[in-house]
Image: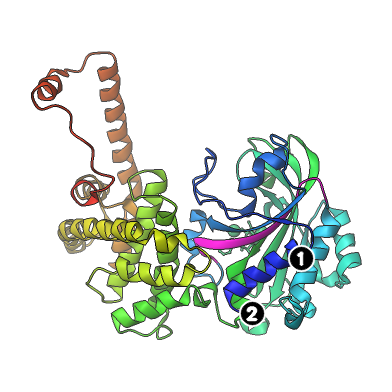
Amino acid sequence: MQTHEINNRFIEHFRGRGHTVVPSASLILDDPTLLFVNAGMVQFKPYFLGEAPAPYPRATSIQKCVRTGDIDEVGKTTRHNTFFQMAGNFSFGDYFKEGAMDYAWDLITRSQSEGGYGMDPGRLWVTVFENDAEAAGLWRQVTGISPERIQARDAKDNYWDMGVPGPGGPCSEIYYDRGPKYGREGGPIVDEDRYIEIWNLVFMQDIRGELAPKEGHPPIGELPTKNIDTGMGVERVACLLQGVENVYETDLVRPVIAKAEELSGRRYGANHEDDVRFRVIADHARSGVMLVGDGVTPGNEARGYVLRRLLRRIIRSTRLLGVQEPVLGEFSKVVRDAMAPSYPELVTEFDRIDSVMRNEEDAFLATLTAGSKIFDMAVADTKRAGGKQLAGAKAFQLHDTYGFPIDLTLEMASEQGLTVDEQGFRNLMAEQRRRAKEDAKSRKTGHGDLSTYRTLLDQHGTTDFIGYTDLRSHSR
Ligand code: ATP
Ligand code: MG
Ligand code: MG
Ligand code: MG
């Protein structure tokens, strides 16, 4: 079943059960606690908190999500994307645990000819929060699942919150058993690569404070109503229903791998190292396009830095596959074609997306060319001296003068069998920040001499900052 159809069936299932269909929010919402939208519930947060009345008692959506915290898993586990789609259903003080369990189970186990996903109930497992005795009983009652396939877990796994103060609650997750080929028996507690988490049902009832319930600190209050917030991983369901090995091989991601195969002349599936690169490229190309599509531009801070890191990792990984030519424009087109049926803005915005991509690639290739010489020399010197670690000062110089992010230096060093003195690097960065702060302070208090700037301004007038459109000459 294609991803498009998985989404359609989800939406139709919940529309038919009284849910208002709400479009995905942008990946960048005005929520100071979040860099990117990372779950379907984010746009509904004020309704859970009671800050605004919910315009509908029930809603459903397919939300674009970015989880940068999962970046190191990408390509290595079978199930983590940096960009993925979360299908969800939400109840604002309407139905609660029992309803959520019933709706979810019905959709995934109903036969495909009757509009469901047709999963074999004999392969499904569920987890419950250890302090939520009610949930285990309800699962048995609602679904008839055998008690051996209900596992209790602690707050670390089965208490959900946004990672910051806000709504939260105990949760229950549905897992699919892929069978002995994928790992050890015994349920999700034992092996999460064999038992794939597909759907999380959150019983949203608490207010989480500064301290995390996951770390044993109780919530600080109760929400005005008992709510439901669920998230089903669309790529994970696609992986299972399409019978492929991992989320990167699903219908909307795999075409980028095919493009990378074409450009490099290497074959996916030939060796593990290259395969990880292919998967990283496919995953990051999609996140990159979706982020630029929602208005993020590469930069040196916050969102822009995350985007920059993703794009640079694509370029580096493709180079490691032996490709020297610019590639981002090629991958963007493939992502656009795969994703446009669900996200038509990718077509209308494509010229802008494409030019952001190309500018960033030009800038990075220039950086790489300049910095790689210094890097290679540093590696040669270190090795000649019998060392195993690149000096912190070198990493700092690469960062400061050539715009090499530290993770790039780390990655390139490890390819050369070297480590990096990260602490030394960090100390120098801290030192630089301290100096910059002092400078700023002395300017504020009027100690700095600004007369030169004044004279320049008087002579030449102001200049326009063009870094947003012309990254080539301004960014590293
Ligand atoms: P995991 O334990 O596998 O990291 P999670 O518990 O962090 O997943 P939730 O926060 O419960 O995930 O998100 C709801 C659903 O979204 C998950 O059940 C899963 O199907 C999907 N999902 C979560 N993270 C990712 C990701 N990085 N890539 C693809 N799908 C994801
Ligand atoms: Mg996770
Ligand atoms: Mg989990
Ligand atoms: Mg979960």
Mark pair 2, 1: CA separation: 16 Å
Q: Which kind of residue does numbered mark 1 sit on? A: Ala
Residue at the spot of label 2: 241
Mark 2 is surrounded, within 10 Å at the Cα level, by few (under 14), some (14 to 19) or many (20 or more) other residues, namely some
Side of 134 where 66 appears, left or right: left
Locate residue 475, reporting x and y percent: 24, 48
Residue 120 has which mark?
none
Regarding mark 1 in the picture, which secondary structure is present there?
helix
**What residue is at 41 percent from the left and 50 percent from the top?**
295
Snapshot quadrant of residue 150: bottom right
Q: Which kind of residue does numbered mark 2 sit on? A: Leu
Q: How is the image coloured?
A: rainbow
Residue 172 falls inside the magenta stretch: no
Side of 105 where 191 appears, left or right: left
Viewer can see residue 126: yes
Residue 104 has which mark?
1
**What residue is at 48 percent from the left and 55 percent from the top?**
68
Regarding mark 2 in the picture, which secondary structure is present there?
helix
Instruction: From the image, give the main secondary structure of the stretch colored magenta.
Output: strand
324 or 427, nearer to the observer: 324
Q: Which residues are magenta?
A: 80-94
273 or 68, nearer to the observer: 68
